[in-house]
Image (spheres, rainbow, N blue to C red):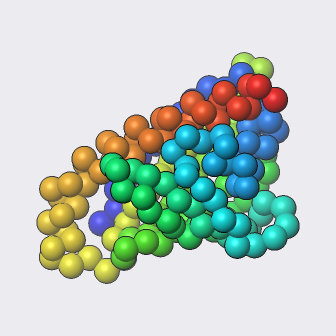
Amino acid sequence: MEHTTTLTQHINASPEKVWAVVSDIPGSAATLSGIDSVQMLSEGPYGEGTRWKETRTMLGKQETVEMWVAEADPPRSTTVKAHQGGAAYTTRFNLAGRDAGTDLTVTFGAEVLKPTFLSKVGMALFGKLGMSFTRKALGKDLAEIAAKAESL
């Protein structure tokens, strides 16, 4: 049972500038107001295998999730994954040059790894509500990525 949502933001900056913001994990807490803190777990430049812990506050609850880069194709796309509380999360960023700028598309997916009867009922009842909060948070992240990239 998977839930996905996709949003696109046009950014008045080159794909390279947008990529610089998207791939700046150590600086993401300064760029994105939804992130409280980031703790790097790996060294080196952004790429497949880069790992970190990200702490966010959503709905008044602070949660820390370990994340990793599953795919990186600079400056075109990257996929970030996380597992938390019996669910697998996938976030994919696609960057496409358009009109002297970049269309940044983010697709977020959540999948319960071992669905039980109760988790299926919970997803049926609260899945849409959860995804609406997620869409709002992703929209805010995209706007803040745009503001940072346009200021570079």
Name the image quarter holding residue 132: top left
Location of residue 87 with respect to 141 vertically, above or below: below
Name the image quarter holding residue 120: bottom left
Q: Determine the residue positioned at 25% across, 54% down.
A: 127
The answer to whether one can see residue 148 in this image is yes
Q: Is residue 12 left or right of residue 143?
A: right
Specify the farthest residue to the right: 44
Q: Determine the residue positioned at 74% across, 25% down.
A: 150
Location of residue 103 with respect to 110 vertically, above or below: above
Q: Quadrant of the C terminus?
A: top right
Name the image quarter holding residue 88: bottom left
The answer to whether one can see residue 98 in this image is no
Q: Nearer the viewer, residue 41 or 97?
A: 41
Q: Determine the residue positioned at 44% across, 41% down.
A: 137
Q: Nearer the viewer, residue 150 or 54?
A: 54
Q: Is residue 126 left or right of residue 114?
A: left
Q: Position of residue 113 (x, y in %)?
A: 36, 76
Location of residue 116 with respect to 46 vertically, above or below: below
Q: Position of residue 73 (x, y in %)?
A: 76, 55
Q: Quadrant of the N terminus?
A: bottom left
Specify the farthest residue to the top: 99
Q: Is residue 83 left or right of residue 19?
A: left
Q: Determine the residue positioned at 60% across, 67% down.
A: 53
Location of residue 56 with respect to 75 vertically, above or below: below
Q: Position of residue 130 (x, y in %)?
A: 30, 51
Q: Position of residue 97 (x, y in %)?
A: 73, 31
Circle count: 0
Q: Is residue 66 left or right of residue 76?
A: left
